[in-house]
Image (cartoon, rainbow, N blue to C red):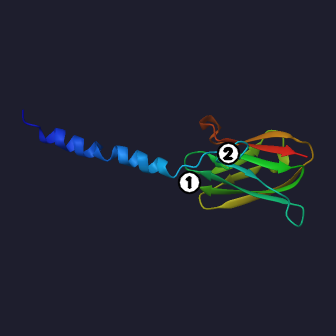
Amino acid sequence: MPVSARFVRLLAAFAGVPVLFATACSNSQPIQSGAPQHGDVTVTPGPNGVQNVTVVANAQFRFVPATINAKVGRIHLTLRIKGGTPHNLTFDDLDSATIPTTSQGQTRSSDFTVSTPGRYQFVCTIHESLNQAGTLVVSR
């Protein structure tokens, strides 16, 4: 029974797929218990006592890192835009930490103090319906 040219092209197109999956998984590292997950960051105070952190808003409508672990105290938060659309960063419970709408390639910062430990959610109000959100986790 003759094999059609279309079938041969289809077979050739999928021939490398298992190799791609094997290659992509070959460099995987297991996550150790208690290790931060991808997209998490822990900040520590610098010599001046300020905790500096940069959050990137990307074209996939995500914040990276999505979780920021910090201590009670002063925080200098910078929003960097890497994506075609403008983004902002707003906290529900930390009015002083709001960063206004920022365009592609720009950065804007906010300096604020958190005196109460807790979980503080931040969102991009422009893309909140797309679940562009993150969490600032503050401990003593």
Kind of residue indicated by mark 2: Gln
Picture coordinates of residue 107 (x, y %)? 68, 61
First in residue order: circle 2 vs circle 1: 2
Pick the front one: 53 or 89:
53
| Residue in view at x 36 percent, y 43 percent | 18
Q: Nearer the viewer, mark 2 or mark 1?
A: 2
Pick the front one: 84 or 38:
38
Task: Report the side of 45 relative to 85 (left or right).
Answer: right
Kind of residue indicated by mark 1: Gly
Task: Report the side of 130 relative to 22 (left or right).
Answer: right
| 133 versus 100 height, above or below | above
| Residue in view at x 93 percent, y 46 percent | 115
| Residue in view at x 80 percent, y 43 percent | 137
Q: Label 1, secondary structure: give it.
A: loop
Q: Which residue is mark 1?
A: 83
Pick the front one: 23 or 86:
23
Picture coordinates of residue 87 (x, y %)? 64, 49
Count neighbours of disc 1 (C-alpha within 10 A) and say few if under 14, some if 14 to 19, many if 20 or more. Answer: some
* Quarter the N terminus occupies: top left
